[in-house]
């Protein structure tokens, strides 16, 4: 148990569906992150939130929409996805958003877009 | 450009063998942080170690040890007397300042899949 919980663990959706991924951290951290892990590719940072404010958007398509209502919760809203968006989506949190901070990861949501 | 290279895609060893996972990085910053994470089949990345660029002391934690050499931009990871439970994907990562907000951005290598056979 890492203290970062992601739901659902698996998700299958069609290209016209709308779904949301949820992440919750129980570590009292102030920063949260979304990463994408595709087959044969390194993990890619998507978004960073610090104190509920988005501080980094790594050129992610608008069909991915993050939301951070408080420092413990992070969502990734998905709509009109493409098959190439199929991947493992990992959430992480850290004490602060600075570069020395250790990021703790959840187990991820395995997304398949049909 | 910042980059992390893990040249070994897959390594297979027999239990009790020692194994070293290589990591080479590129950065222009003088201050940076290096990390190793383990990703077992369950999916979550498990933090193993953080090292800052000013501390070149090698570190040992049980069967794990890390060799940081700034001169060759390498941060290698050795597992001594490997066990089946060590089977996982191991990622090396570099953290640098990103953007005006000074956000820490982790740049990951491709990962090395380690299989330890009984």
Image (spheres, grey):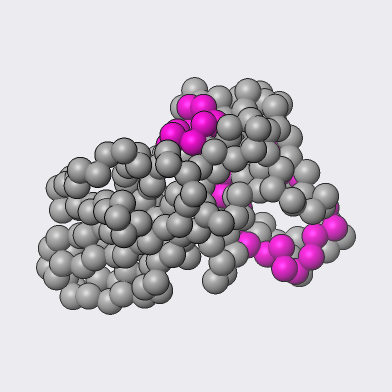
Residue B114 horizontal/vertical position (percent): 32, 69
State yes or no: residue A87 in magenta.
yes
Q: Residue at x 22, y 75 (%)?
A: B13
Q: Residue at x 31, y 38 (%)?
A: B54
Q: Residue at x 24, y 44 (%)?
A: B56
Decide if residue A21 is in sight here: no
Residue B42 versus residue B32 in the image, above or below: below
Decide if residue B27 is on the left or right side of residue B99. Answer: left
Q: Residue at x 70, y 27 (%)?
A: A53
Residue B33 horizontal/vertical position (percent): 40, 42
Residue A64 versus residue A92 in the image, above or below: below
Which quadrant of the figure contains the C terminus of chain B? Answer: bottom left
Decide if residue B33 is in sight here: yes
Which quadrant of the figure contains the N terminus of chain B? Answer: bottom right
Q: Nearer the viewer, residue A26 or B68?
A: B68
Quadrant of residue B30 in the image? top left
Q: Nearer the viewer, residue B88 or B34?
A: B34
Decide if residue A21 is on the left or right side of residue B71. Answer: right
Looking at the rendered structure, the number of numbered marks drawn on it comes to: 0
Q: Nearer the viewer, residue A34 or A15?
A: A34
Residue B60 horizontal/vertical position (percent): 17, 47
Decide if residue B20 is on the left or right side of residue A74. Answer: left
Residue B38 horizontal/vertical position (percent): 37, 54
- Residue numbers of the magenta segment: A75-102
State yes or no: residue A63 in magenta.
no
């Amino acid at each position: 148990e890492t203290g970062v919980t992601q739901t659902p663990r698996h998700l299958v959706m069609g290209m016209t569906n709308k779904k949301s991924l949820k992440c919750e951290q129980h570590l009292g951290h102030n920063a949260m992150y979304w990463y994408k892990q595709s087959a044969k590719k390194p993990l890619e940072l998507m978004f960073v939130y610090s104190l509920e404010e988005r501080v980094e958007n790594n050129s992610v398509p608008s069909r991915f929409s993050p939301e951070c209502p408080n420092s413990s919760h992070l969502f990734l809203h998905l709509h009109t996805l493409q098959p190439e968006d199929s991947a493992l989506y990992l959430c992480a949190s850290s004490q602060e958003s600075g570069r020395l901070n250790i990021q703790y990861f959840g187990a991820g949501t395995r997304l398949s877009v049909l | 450009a910042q980059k992390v290279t893990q040249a070994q895609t897959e390594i297979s060893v027999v239990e009790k063998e020692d194994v070293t996972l290589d990591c080479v990085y590129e950065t222009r910053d003088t201050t940076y942080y290096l990390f190793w994470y383990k990703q077992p089949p369950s999916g979550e990345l498990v933090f193993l170690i953080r090292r800052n660029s000013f501390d070149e002391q090698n570190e040992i934690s049980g069967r794990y040890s890390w060799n940081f050499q700034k001169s060759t931009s390498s941060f290698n990871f050795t597992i001594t007397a490997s066990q089946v439970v060590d089977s996982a994907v191991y990622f090396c990562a570099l953290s640098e300042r990103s953007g005006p907000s000074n956000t820490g951005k982790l740049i990951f290598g491709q990962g090395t899949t380690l299989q330890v056979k009984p």
